[in-house]
Structures are given as C-alpha cells and as structure tokens.
Image (tube, grey):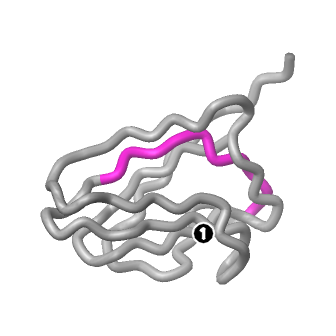
Amino acid sequence: MMQTDVLATAIAAGQTNSAVFAGPARIKGMVVSVPAAGGTMTLQNGSGGTVKFSFVAPAVAGAVSVLIPGQGILCSSGIYATTPANMPVTVFYG
C-alpha cells in the first residue's frame, strides 16, 4: 500500500473559499474549534466547488476532532474551506 505525507493547514474563522491546499488531495481529518453559537463549516472541491464535507456544530463551545475513514475524501480540484465567525479549523490532508 502506498503512503503519502499527511499535512495540515489552519484556516481562520469567518473565511469563504479559503485554500487549504490548491492541488489534488484527500481530506484525512480535522480539528474544529466550536464557538458557543455553533455553526456550519464546509470543505469544497475547488474554490466555490461542490461541497465534499459539511460539519454542523451544536451551540456548545469546545473542540471536536473529526477522523475521515479509509483513504479520505478526494478533492481533485483542491480543498477549500468556508468557516463561520469564531470557528477556526485545522484540516489534515494528504
């Protein structure tokens, strides 16, 4: 089985179509800092592209780790994130 390096990019809160990685990659997981108001964070295939992952956080402050099973979610046009106010995310990809 072929292995790839796992990399990470932190995306600030309140971003729209912010590049996690601009080339083809697979989403492996993430750590989401959830604000007291909750919110929805999405990861898209390409800037403004198809939503490949959506995380709806409840209105409870804290941090949540999300692990993607298998080989991850393929984003052939790059991984781009949209985050609500006060919800930064660190995305792991490879």
State the residue at coordinates (65%, 69%). 51
State the residue at coordinates (34%, 52%). 32
* Image x and y of residue 41, in percent: 43, 66
**Compared to 3, does 36 lie above or below?**
below
The quadrant where residue 56 appears? bottom left
Q: Amino acid at mark 1?
A: Tyr
Q: In this rendering, would 89 be left or right of 44?
A: left
* Image x and y of residue 93, in percent: 61, 44
Residue at the disc numbered 1: 80
**Compared to 37, does 75 lie above or below?**
above
* Image x and y of residue 55, in percent: 45, 58
Q: Which residues are magenta?
A: 23-32
**Magenta span dominant secondary structure:** strand
Residue 26 on the magenta span: yes
* Image x and y of residue 20, in percent: 56, 62
State the residue at coordinates (24%, 65%). 38
Labels in figure, total? 1
Quadrant position of the N terminus in the picture: top right
